[in-house]
Amino acid sequence: MMLLLLICLLAPTAFPQSMRKQPNQSVTPAAVRAEFLHAWNGYKKYAWGHDDLKPLSKGYHDWYAEPLLMTPVDALDTMILMGLKDEATDTKNYIIKNLSFDKDISVQNFEVTIRLLGGLLSSYQLTGDKRLLALAEDLGNRLLPVFESPTGLPYRYVNLKTGKVRDAKTNPAEAGTLLIEFGTLSKLTGRPIFYDKAKRALVEIYKRRSAIGLVGTWIDVETGEWKDTDSHISGAIDSYYEYLLKCWLLLDDQDCKQMWLDSIAAINKYLQDHEPDVKRRSDLQLWYGHADMNTGKRSATAYGALDAFFPAVLALSGDLERAGRLQQSSMKMWELHGIEPEEIDYKTMKVTYPGYPLRPEIVESTYYLHHYASLGAAPQRTGTAKLPPLANRAVYLRMGEQLFRDFVKHCRTDEGYAALKSVVTKEKTDSMQSFLFAETFKYFYLLFAPARTLDFNKVIFNTEAHPIRRTWK
Ligand code: DMJ
């Protein structure tokens, strides 16, 4: 019965031919939307008003003592893009009526910024409803105390009611993934304080790069000293690099441009790695590994689901050649067990962390590469020669179809989607994080939907896939 349902969902549907990108496209946007609704209805039935659905026990999970509506806020702009008008209106009205940040809870600045601040700003831009902007500004005001450290680097947690901060040890991703949201808040409210504080945090990380241009994993916000010098593009650093590039593009910030150009040169010099294909020894695969930030010495040949965002960033920067090659490596990681693990050792191609928490990054990169392959050109960022796309767009559509089928096959439950405890055994675990709605389903949908659904060139996605438009001069 279950199998029959899956076949029906994934088979070419009666979706109008004009809504398909290719005549033989086998996954339609309607199929993705149906899966989004399947998970959303599970959330509504068992976890409404809370942060996340627990898909196996059919209960709910709140991040803190009181809920902050993580799933509805993260999901709203995806509903709008999917054309789910009634659902989006109801969800927006529920958020406006019920979401309050006047709560005596200590929250993680990074997560609340990328999910809630980003989600509110994007949904404000898509709906024009000023009450969403008012919520965003209230949240922004309550987060500001994090920046009151001796260095300007943000503390990790802040109490939304009292402004009390805690956790002085942070990482580049948490300190440096704030400027899209805080910068946009400044542009939309006319209050420069948000931009200035978040920009300083980004610069303070960059200023502490090593002599060879790399940053480490953990840093003390009170002393500015590195506490862990492991350098990589993975979790805890990843979106710091993403925001250097994207803040240049969204905010036209020339300091960010320079910081990005310096950083990518060091990344490609010290973290880029090549390994022969285990099966076909002639092919050299492209990977990005770990190295010590001071010596540049390789410390681990680890790559994982989070690193799979990097082809999207490389493509956006204009480097389609590396983007395409790294995407092939990400696919190799996915194909090891038919769905990607959290981390592998790319030298041995063995799984080192077997979980899969419904992550979107590999889908995100497929969407970006498909976009540039469709255009037939790389973006011209620094006046370098035009690079040819590595493959034609059909390759990325096929890739996306494979990802979607595997994703549904292994993660779908009777009333939602569940993370995998192990991609090897395919055992599920009781978690369905809100980025499933903000990112994973959104990138799948945009990949399969007509290009007019969202003008790629007019938006910058924050790291939680909330599209932000530059509506200011
Ligand atoms: C999301 O919250 C964001 O994409 C973040 O940058 C990394 N982790 C998750 C998704 O994997």
Image (cartoon, rainbow, N blue to C red):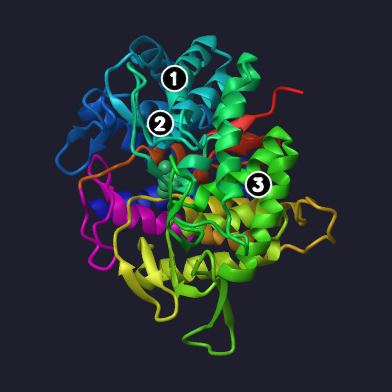
Figure quadrant of residue 112: top left
For the residues bearing labels 1 and 2, Cβ distance under 8 angstroms? yes
Residue holding disc 2: 112
**Residue sitting nearer the eye, 381 or 201:** 201
Q: Secondary structure at mark 2?
A: helix
Q: Earlier in the sequence, mark 1 or mark 2?
A: 2
Residue at the location (37% across, 26% down)? 72
Can see residue 24? no
Going by the picture, which residue comes out furthest to the bottom?
281
Q: Secondary structure at mark 1?
A: helix
Whether residue 257 is situated above or below residue 420 in the rendered picture = above
Disc 2 residue crowd, few under 14, some 14–19, many 20+, Cα 10 Å = some
Q: Residue 458's spot in the image, x, y percent?
A: 70, 34
- The image's mark for residue 245 is 3
Q: Earlier in the sequence, mark 2 or mark 3?
A: 2
Tell whether 51 sits left or right of 274: left
Figure quadrant of residue 421: bottom left
User: Range of the magenta residues?
Assistant: 401-429
Whether residue 295 is situated above or below residue 461 in the rendered picture = below
Looking at the rendered structure, the kind of residue marked 3 is Leu
Looking at the rendered structure, the kind of residue marked 1 is Leu
